[in-house]
Amino acid sequence: MNLNDLTYKIRGTIFKVHNTLGPGLLESVYEAALAHELRKSGLQVQTQLGIPVMYDDINLELGFRLDILVENLVIIEIKSIDRLHDVHKKQLLTYLKLSEKKIGILVNFNASSLIDKESIIKIIN
C-alpha cells in the first residue's frame, strides 16, 4: 500500500470514529477508538510511542510521545480542543523530524464536522 492509499484509509477511519462518537470527549477516548478501528482494518498500530530527543550524543529522555503511529510510517496527532493553532502543526512537524517520518495527520475531534480543512490536516516533513 502506498502512502496516499494509507493516508486515505486513515482519514476514512478518522471520519468513522468522529461520526460515531461526535465531538466533546477526551483525546484519550478518540485515541483508543481510532487505534481499535485502524487495527480492525488490518493496519499495524502503535500508541503513545516515545520519541527520543538526542542532543550532543545524549538522549534527553523528555517524554515526548506520539499519539498513534500507523504502519511505522504515518503519525496521527489527536486533539480535542476549540480549534487547532499553528503550535499544534509545529508540534507534529517536530515529531516528524525527531522520528524521521515523512507524513503526519493532525486531527481535532472536538470540531462539529471534520469536513472543515482546519480540523484535519496532513503535514509532510
Image: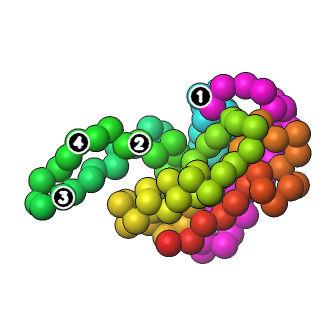
Q: Residue at x 51, y 42 (%)?
A: 67
The residue where tag 4 is placed is: 61
Q: The magenta stretch spans which residues? A: 1-27
> What crowding class fits label 1: few (fewer than 14 Cα within 10 Å), some (14-19), or many (20 or more)?
few
Label 4 or label 3, whichever lies nearer to me, is: 3
> Identity of the amino acid at label 1?
Ser
Residue 68 colored in magenta in the image = no
CB-based contact (under 8 Å), mark 1 and mark 4: no
Label 3 or label 2, whichever lies nearer to me, is: 3
CB-based contact (under 8 Å), mark 3 and mark 1: no
Q: Nearer the viewer, residue 51 or 6?
A: 51
> Identity of the amino acid at label 2?
Arg
> What crowding class fits label 3: few (fewer than 14 Cα within 10 Å), some (14-19), or many (20 or more)?
few
The residue where tag 1 is placed is: 28
* Residue 49 found in image quarter: top left
The residue where tag 2 is placed is: 65
Q: Is residue 62 left or right of residue 16?
A: left
The residue where tag 3 is placed is: 55
> Identity of the amino acid at label 3?
Tyr
